[in-house]
Amino acid sequence: MNIIDGKAVSKAVRERVAEETERLKKKGVTPGLAVIIVGEDPASQVYVRNKEKACEEVGFYSEKFALPENTTQEELNSLVQKLNQRDDINGILCQLPLPAHLDDKEVINLISPIKDVDAFHPENVGAIMIGDYHFLPCTPAGVMELIHSTGVDVCGKKAVVIGRSNIVGKPMAMLLLHENATVEITHSRTRNLSEITAGADILVAAIGKAKFVTADMVKEGAVVIDVGMNRDENGKLCGDVDFENVKDKCSYITPVPGGVGPMTISMLMQNTLTAAKLQNGIKD
């Protein structure tokens, strides 16, 4: 069993982005990211701080727009439209979840597809579906980087994704498919789930249920990627995979924390860099 070190892979991605950013700056282009946060959600505040730190680390310009809880849809929409027009902002990210009275779909649809560094806009989602995309959703893209870091070839392997969310499960399946895996998506209505997962060469768990995946659900020698971020009965951070129970059965496994988590923000940096190049007509 090998533990996939998300911190090390994430560091390599950021170093690559920082080097490219230096080259862009010599051409007079500094990638810029705008992060919008509405209200006081503590988890969202932590994520936003981490995004600001990552921007600093790779040499981006970043701007945070912290809006009060009672911000109206019109005010939020108007801010997005202004940011769409600004040349110094290449990526726009609206931190979810939004307060209940705001419509996140409306906001996502308003962000210019070429500045949609989360890859949530329907145009970008469609591009991922057909395999002709500029941006990938950050978490699935991070998962692919982790799989590549193992040296395992995805082509021809049986991959099972547990979870069908628009943010992780569905795009994850598409990215595995683009690399010629045979993919099965499972979810809460799937029958004989453990039989299906036990046949997977690559198993990606993204359901948000603490320690849901147990050893009997895992094939000997599988690559297991745990996207979950939960708390166990003692309040300790854990994933969707029962790590202690499963680890000796895998060829590779990601820990929680320190696996997929660090990758998400690094891939956001990669997307923002791509956006800056696209908007400035820089091919390489």
Image: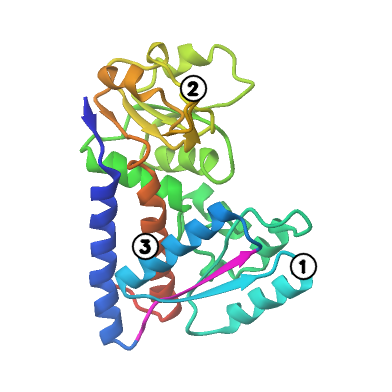
User: Which residue is depicted at the point 47% across and 16% down?
Assistant: 196
Side of 49 relative to 155 (left or right)? right
Q: Tell me if residue 118 can be seen.
A: no
Separation of marks 3 and 2 at Cα, in angstroms: 31 Å
Q: In this figure, which residue is indicated by the disc labeled 2?
A: 212
Side of 248 relative to 130 (left or right)? left
**What mark, if any, has residue 219 been given in the picture?**
none
Above or below, 180 relative to 75: above
Q: Main secondary structure of the magenta part?
A: strand
Above or below, 161 relative to 38: above
| Residue 278, position as x, y percentages in the image | 42, 74
Q: Closest to the observer: 120 or 51?
A: 51
Q: Residues within 10 Å of mark 2 (few under 14, many from 20)?
A: some
Q: In this figure, which residue is indicated by the disc labeled 3?
A: 270
Q: Quadrant of residue 187?
A: top right
Q: Residue furthest bottom?
A: 28
Q: Which comes sooner in the sequence, label 2 or label 1?
A: 1
Q: Quadrant of residue 105?
A: bottom right
Inspect the image, locate mark 2, and give the three-letter code of the amino acid beneath it: Phe
Inspect the image, locate mark 3, and give the three-letter code of the amino acid beneath it: Gln
Q: Tell me if residue 4 can be seen.
A: yes
User: Which residue is depicted at the point 60% across and 59% down?
Assistant: 121
Highlighted magenta segment, given as a residue range = 29-38
Q: In this figure, which residue is indicated by the disc labeled 1?
A: 73
Q: Quadrant of residue 23?
A: bottom left
